[in-house]
Every structure is written in C-alpha cells, then in structure tokens.
Image (spheres, grey):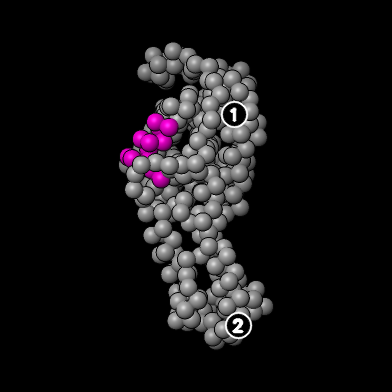
Amino acid sequence: MAIPQIQHYPIPSHVTLNRPALPWTPAPERAALLIHDMQNHFLKPYASQAFVEGLVQRIQSLRVACHALGIPVYYTAQPGDQQAESRGLLCDFWGPGLAEDGVSPGIVAGLAPDPQRDVVLVKHRYSAFARSDFLERLQVAGRDQLIICGVYAHIGCLTTATEAFMADIQPFVVADALGDFSLERHQLALEHMAHCSSVVLSSRQLLDALALVQVAHDLPGDVARCLALPVEQVVAVDDPVQLGLDSVRLLMLFEQWQQAGLPVTFLELLERRSIRAWVQLIDLRLQAQPAGEAA
C-alpha cells in the first residue's frame, strides 16, 4: 500500500506517560542526534504545511543545540529507484518506494545536512541500524545515547529506538519532534517506546537537560572568569582556596549556578576543596534525576 494522506493533528507537546521515570540523563559527551527520514517523499503526504513547518523548526532547534554542544548529528535517507530485490518485503507493504526524481529522496528544506560535520546514513529497512555501519560509528565515537526525531514515529523511529536499546544505547525520543500518520499512532508509539526502550520527553525538556549538564561541566570556566585566571590554571590547581576563591565570590557563583538549576547546596561546595569534586557531585545528582525533571 502507498503511504496515506496524513491529516493535521495536534502534535504532543507535553509528555505525560504512565510509567516510572528512567534514571537516564542526556549528556553532550555521550549523545548523538538522529534525524530520521526527513525526506520530501515522507513529508509530502502531510495535508498541513503548518504541521511540517512546525516539525522542521523543532528539529532545527535540536540540531543547532547539538552542533553547539559538540554532539554528532546523523541523518537517515532512503535511496530512490530501489530494485525490488533490494527492498524485499517493504515492496509488499509500501510499494516501490522513492522515485529518483531529484526531489523525493532529498532532505526537506531547512534541514539540509552540513557536509562538513553531519553524516547521512543510507536507509534500507525500518531501523537505522539495519544494513548500515551506524552502530560501529556510534561505538567509535564513544556515544551510548541516541536522541531520535523525525518520521514516522510508529515505524522507523520506534524500530530504531528498540534496536538501540538492544545494543545498550540509551534512546531519548523527542515527542514533539516526531511525525506520524495520526495522533493515535503517534501516542501509541510514544507509549510503546516509554514502556519498552526509551526516555520520552519534549524538545524543551531535552534542551533544558542538555544545557544543565553543560553548565555543570563549565564550572571550572565560571571559576576562571570570576578570578580572571586561565581555565587551564583552574583545572590544574583544582583547589578553590589556593586559587583565591573566597566565600563571598563563591556565594556569587553559587547563586549563579542555583539560578541555572544545578542540584547542589552552598554548604556542599564549602565542604569540598576541589572543583573537580563539585562537578562529580553535580553529575551524580543529574544522573539520578530523570530527564525532563532537570529544569
């Protein structure tokens, strides 16, 4: 069967799922972003251009943030004019697939990959891992978390999340950065992933969680700026007292970190004469704090 025309539906923007929260927190040094099948062919069935534009804008925000944080970005894209023997059983479900017409296989305008730093994986089956070196790329890059967005939620996104989970990669599924055939299927996919494989959260929750981890890891930089010292010196000495950080300036920094949402008390900072220990303590707290509850 061909992909049906997809009517506009209200995309889930607030995630409320009936399951215990997983103790996973996305971290810039561990995560990769997957922009799944955002090709013209798969977006053409949407009757509402506003739906597509909103989806693209939310994925753009994720990509910009990931680039800024050094998180690698991957795309999946199915090739055009596939032979029947290459498509296999996909032919029975979806017909011949994409035409190689110069438009259908292309990534939608506004999300074109950056050839200098993004990787486009050739997609052969529902899962981004099937018949590709995606898993090996993630392992070589030291990435054991996968942020998933794109289309369609109940098909390729769900299958990819499941396979990531089975490879011990933590999937983070961005509910309002997915598209599907209907609200019912969208929500069904979210429920399935939340109960079987993934942390499901909104784009705002994901961006806030990543930003909070980044703030924690930049503590040495904050101390360096406060004391007008090179950050290399702060990292090397590590002891805030030796560096000249008195209680007044520490209180100023604490108020800044508290406003950003870091889970630490002023007394805990005073008790530890090590900036590295501060970061480690906050990291442990963030890891114990389910994603989506960080802000």
The quadrant of the picture occupied by the N terminus is top left
Residue type of the residue flagged with mark 2: Val
Residue at 40% in and 32% down: 189
Looking at the image, residue 201 lies above or below residue 266: above
Residue at 38% in and 60% down: 288
The one nearer the camera, 278 or 295, is 295
Is 1 positioned to the left or the right of 101 in the image?
left
Q: Main secondary structure of the magenta part?
A: helix
- Mark 1 burial class by Cα count in 10 Å: few <14, some 14-19, many 20+: some
Residue 191 falls inside the magenta stretch:
yes
Residue at 38% in and 36% down: 191
Q: Position of residue 63 (x, y in %)?
A: 58, 44
The one nearer the camera, 275 or 87, is 275
Q: Quadrant of residue 60?
A: top right
Looking at the image, residue 156 lies above or below residue 58: above
Instruction: Give the SS element for disc 2.
Output: helix
Q: Earlier in the sequence, mark 1 or mark 2?
A: 1
Looking at the image, residue 8 lies above or below residue 72: above
Residue 130 falls inside the magenta stretch:
no
> What segment carries the magenta color?
187-199
The one nearer the camera, 286 or 171, is 286
Q: Position of residue 57 (x, y in %)?
A: 62, 37
Q: Position of residue 46 (x, y in %)?
A: 57, 22
Q: Position of residue 11 (x, y in %)?
A: 52, 33
Q: Is residue 243 visible?
A: no
- Mark 2 burial class by Cα count in 10 Å: few <14, some 14-19, many 20+: few
Q: Which residue is mark 2?
A: 248
Q: Which residue is mark 1?
A: 51
